[in-house]
Image (cartoon, rainbow, N blue to C red):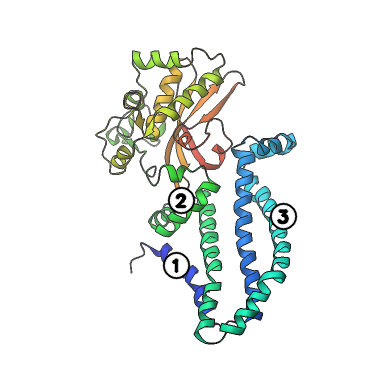
Amino acid sequence: MNYENILDVFLVCLMVFPILKGFICKFSSKSYKERVFSVQCSLSFLLCILCSVMVNKNIFIEQKEGIYSTIYSNIPNVILELVNNAPFIIYVIFIPTVALFLYKVFQITFVFINKIFFDPLLESLDKHIGEGIGGRVLGAIFEIPKAIVNLIVCCLIISAINLFTTSSISNDYISKSKIYNYVNGEILSPITTSNIAKSLPNLLNNSFKVNVDESLAKNNGNIEESKNVIIYYNGVTLDQAIKSNESLESFARELVNKEVTSIDKAEKIYSWITKNITYDYDKAEDIINNNYSKNSGAITAFNSRKGICFDYASLYVTMCKANNIPVRLITGMGFDGEQWVNHSWNQVYIKEIDNWIDVDCTFGLSGNYFNNLRFKIDHKEGKVAGEW
């Protein structure tokens, strides 16, 4: 048996079941008054969760201006500190709390709406077409909203579970599911994530690869710590990737010459890269297929004005180095809105606060990823590949 699209089969069955049940069961106003209220509750439950996710994301993660900024500024420091140290609290406490409050408001509202509008409508439908095939078709139609809710809630659960696991098996099933990827990309990702899945669909996956020169790795118990092992990132060494030239260094210094603090310089470099370097879809496909014919690294990205995650990170290193700003290149896993994938980003040292902060120019194509709280949510297993 071919299990390639088993997730799609499951999602289709999840949608079809309530519609089929509605067709089989005879329509009656009494039973459908209860069903309509059930559907309303299901729809409101989904809406409340999505609204709560969006509101909490805008307050705590994106820290957007306007009413969200006002709310954030009035939150006690002890809560903000707790959230910064453990961002998962947003998902297990704040999102459910806001969703539950909104859900209760919706339930009370629906009781009044049903008495005025839906109950008389259902009684009239039962009287005129409740018997025969018409009643069965009507029963199926009334279950369509519930079927849609089932699909979206299931996809939301899969997305949440996938956020906290890096299983290659689950990633394979998810990547092959056309239904899940459509629902996630068109409905869930714009609300629950930073839109990176919509901006870079399926191309981050395996487009960053680390290879070891095995001829130098023999009889070595710890490859990563050995000085005799050459590690290649997308076909080049780290020294080759961050190599610079006079044109690039001159531009990097000129770019930040009006900035005073190291954090302003670091952010100016980040902003320039995210606005001027486009994602190289063709190169990503080549890397996925183990084709390293295209050059990688800072100079290539700067000259061509395009690259993939390793090129973004390498260029950021080179431009920071040109301005004597301590910087790191980090390799690890990034959640692209659909699944965990191999990824690279940066850390930069800010002397004003005596601390390293996270910077991701690739993810910055779709949102703020300069010292953003979201880093602790959609980046993991980060290791320092190099520090300068």
Any part of residue 31 in sight: no
Query: Marks 2 and 3, Cα distance to the nearest angstrom?
Result: 27 Å
Q: Going 50% across and 84% down the picture, which residue do you hit? A: 133
Any part of residue 69 in sight: yes
Q: Is residue 176 above or below residue 262?
A: below
Picture quadrant of residue 262: top right
- Residue beneath label 3, please? 101
Q: Going 61% across and 18% down the picture, which residue do you hit? A: 352
Instruction: State the SS at label 1.
Output: helix
Q: Nearer the viewer, residue 133 or 71?
A: 133
Neighbours of disc 2 within 10 Å: few (<14), some (14-19), many (20+): many
Q: Split into 4 quadrants, where in the image is the N terminus? A: bottom left
Q: Position of residue 335 (x, y in %)?
A: 48, 44
Q: Going 56% across and 30% down the picture, which residue do you hit? A: 371
Neighbours of disc 1 within 10 Å: few (<14), some (14-19), many (20+): some
Instruction: State the SS at label 3.
Output: helix
- Residue beneath label 2, please? 185
The amino acid type, in three-letter code, at marker 1 is Val
Is 6 on the left or on the right of 20, as rendered?
left
Q: Position of residue 165 (x, y in %)?
A: 50, 50
Q: Position of residue 183 (x, y in %)?
A: 47, 56
Q: Which mark is residue 264?
A: none
- Residue beneath label 1, please? 12
